Amino acid sequence: ASGEWDKSAGTLRLRVTRATTPGQDLSFYFAVTNGLEGQASPDISIETTGLRMTPQVMDTPLDNRAPLLIGGFRTKAISQSTVCPGRVNTITITLSFFVPIPWELAIASSGEGGDSAPAIGLSGLTGSD
């Protein structure tokens, strides 16, 4: 097959260049460059022209192999419990990621995994304690 990428429409059109056999798996690959912002894997549909077939959403993995899944924060928020001077102020951070964080990484980031373990860092915080 050969293909044409239409970036503005977000479509890849493939042309079959030889006859196929019913029941035969057709596999192909192509390279894309991920964007710079995190995103969930979108629903990717397949459809045909020349044959009467209803467009179908393709089955995709639910892990880091999901196509066009880009690691990053889905949500990030920070808030505080009080503005009163001299009071204990509880800072609440809420995070959600586009990619799963395996349990092994969560344990490692608690300090049990050594210096190379992933961690979440905050900057710009000041206070008396």
Image (cartoon, rainbow, N blue to C red):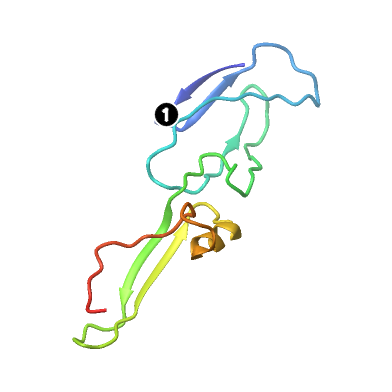
- Quadrant (top left, top right, bottom left, bottom right) of the N terminus: top right
Residue 23: percent from left, percent from top: 81, 27
Give percent across and percent down for residue 36.
Answer: 37, 41
Q: Secondary structure at mark 1?
A: loop
Check disc 1 and report the residue beneath it: 7
Q: Position of residue 54 (x, y in %)?
A: 65, 36
**What residue do we see at 56% from left, 44% from top?**
43
Which quadrant of the figure contains the C terminus? bottom left
Question: Would you say 84 lies left or right of 103 here?
Answer: left
Query: Dot 1, how many residues are within 10 Å of its Cα: few (below 14), some (14-19), or many (20+)?
Result: few
The residue closer to the viewer here, 24 or 107, is 107
For residue 26, what is the image quadrant?
top right
Residue toward you, 15 or 74: 74
- Taking the spot 22% from the left edge, 79% from the top edge, the residue there is 128
| Left or right position of 122 against 1 | left
Amino acid found under the numbered disc labelled 1: Lys
Which residue in the rendered view is the most extreme toward the top? 18
Q: Residue furthest left?
A: 85
Q: Residue at x 63, y 23 (%)?
A: 28
**Horizontal side of residue 95 vs 30, given as left or right:** left
* Residue pictured at 60% horizontal, 60% vertical: 103
Q: Is residue 30 left or right of residue 22?
A: left
